[in-house]
Image (tube, rainbow, N blue to C red):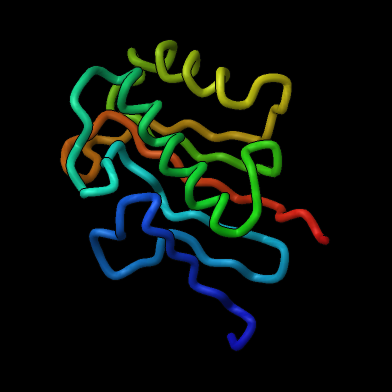
Amino acid sequence: MSNLKIVATNQAPAAIGPYSQAVRLGNLLFTSGQIPLDVNGQVVEGGVEEQTHQVFRNLKAVLAAEGAELKNVVKATVFIKDMNQFGAINEVYASYFGEHKPARSTVEVARLPKDVSVEIELIVAIPVE
């Protein structure tokens, strides 16, 4: 696809495998799942709340690289290691979206990369200038 754009920013951790931070097709941006790594690729210390905040810092940086914000998100997929932590993750999630309510799926998984507690991927409609 010649109109497929690979998105990369040094404001978020680099991909740790054969994938991109995000891919843009037209005005749609598809982020890869972000886990709670700092820009140096280290897992942040703290509990699931701090991990979720770091995931959102990473996502915001990737979106900003293409001129988008969380208010432009149309779909989120949340992967969590323990459904018992859903409430804590959901509280942090809600603090980033406010009144904006994108579609969302939440899935409990057996294991996430680097044994983190949460991973989130987004589909974003980038505003047309």
Q: Is residue 118 left or right of residue 72?
A: left
Location of residue 18 in the rendering, given as x and y in whole percent from the top left corner:
29, 70
The residue depicted at 49 percent of the width and 52 percent of the height is: 62
The residue depicted at 49 percent of the width and 13 percent of the height is: 91
Quarter containing the C terminus:
bottom right
Residue 113's quadrant in the figure?
A: top left
Q: Is residue 70 left or right of residue 110?
A: right
Location of residue 75 in the rendering, given as x and y in whole percent from the top left corner:
63, 42
Q: How many marks?
A: 0
Location of residue 26 in the rendering, given as x and y in whole percent from the top left corner:
71, 70
Q: Spot the residue most to the right.
A: 129
Q: Is residue 26 left or right of residue 23?
A: right
Q: Spot the residue most to the front.
A: 11
Quarter containing the N terminus:
bottom right
Q: Is residue 87 above or below residue 123?
A: above
Location of residue 106 in the rendering, given as x and y in whole percent from the top left corner:
48, 31
The residue depicted at 60 percent of the width and 59 percent of the height is: 66
The residue depicted at 72 percent of the width and 27 percent of the height is: 100
